[in-house]
């Protein structure tokens, strides 16, 4: 039995679905969650700077971010350079996970799908500068979310507060899931 955060639950759920001979049950333990953590989902077209501003307003630490996507106006032959450059940014390269950078032939665009780690204020400002310097174009983000740290014991009140924001689509506790075989 393993306790996993909500971020990794999707990956495990998909792998379990692929196993036809195993019975799948509801893995969420509704009364168990990671104390002091919330997962926040944003409405489509929310730009990352707006998400940063909201979290900084409450002085929350942003642990992980995923789902903000960018296009690069650079030519396809710059794909390797962009990948290497973005991988050099510590907040985009963590525990073997680097930024997703690939060329979409149908759209004739380089797409950047970064997974951010440890987004303190310095890293936030650096990323916003990188977006400007690299001339990245914010795409139609429709599934952006982040894992934030809140004071332990105040999770429910912060859910209620964050749900008031126009850019927040949903807020949840970071539920613990149990996977058994």
Image (cartoon, helix red, strand yellow):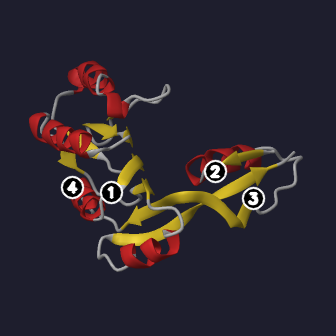
Q: CA distance from mark 4 to mark 1?
A: 13 Å
- In the rendered image, the quadrant that contains the N terminus is top right
Q: Is residue 27 visible?
A: yes
Residue 141: mark: 1
Among the 4 quarters of the image, the one containing residue 58: bottom left
Crowd rating for badge 1 (residues with CA inside 10 Å; few <14, some 14–19, many 20+) = some
The first of marks 3 and 4 along the sequence is: 3
Marks 2/4 in contact by CB < 8 Å: the verdict is: no
The first of marks 4 and 1 along the sequence is: 4
Q: Which residue is mark 3?
A: 27
Q: Residue at x 49, y 25 (%)?
A: 96
Q: Residue at x 30, y 20 (%)?
A: 84
Residue 44's place in the image compared with 128, above or below, is below
| Residue 31 percent coordinates (x, y) | 70, 68
Q: CA distance from mark 3 to mark 4?
A: 34 Å
Q: Nearer the viewer, mark 1 or mark 3?
A: 3
Crowd rating for badge 3 (residues with CA inside 10 Å; few <14, some 14–19, many 20+) = some
| Residue 118 percent coordinates (x, y) | 37, 41
Crowd rating for badge 4 (residues with CA inside 10 Å; few <14, some 14–19, many 20+) = few
**Which element type, helix, strand or loop, lies under badge 4?**
helix
Q: Is residue 24 left or right of residue 65?
A: right
**Which element type, helix, strand or loop, lies under badge 3?**
loop
Q: Which residue is mark 4?
A: 49
Q: CA distance from mark 1 to mark 3?
A: 28 Å
Among the 4 quarters of the image, the one containing residue 136: top left
| Residue 154 percent coordinates (x, y) | 49, 70
Marks 3/4 in contact by CB < 8 Å: the verdict is: no
């Amino acid at each position: 039995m393993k306790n996993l955060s909500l971020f990794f639950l999707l990956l495990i759920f998909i792998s379990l679905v692929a196993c036809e001979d195993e019975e799948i049950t509801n893995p969420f333990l509704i009364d168990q969650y990671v104390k002091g953590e919330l997962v926040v989902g944003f409405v489509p077209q929310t730009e990352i700077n707006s998400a940063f501003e909201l979290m900084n307003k409450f002085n929350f630490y942003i642990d992980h971010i995923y789902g903000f996507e960018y296009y690069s106006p650079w030519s396809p032959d710059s794909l390797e350079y962009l990948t290497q450059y973005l991988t050099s940014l510590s907040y985009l390269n963590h525990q073997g996970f680097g930024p997703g950078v690939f060329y979409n032939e149908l759209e004739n665009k380089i797409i950047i799908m970064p997974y951010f780690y440890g987004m303190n204020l310095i890293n936030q400002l650096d990323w916003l500068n990188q977006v400007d310097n690299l001339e990245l174009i914010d795409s139609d983000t429709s599934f952006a979310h982040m894992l934030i740290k809140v004071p332990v014991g105040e999770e429910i009140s912060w859910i209620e507060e964050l749900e008031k924001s126009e850019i927040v689509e949903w807020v949840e506790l970071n539920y613990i899931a149990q996977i058994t075989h």
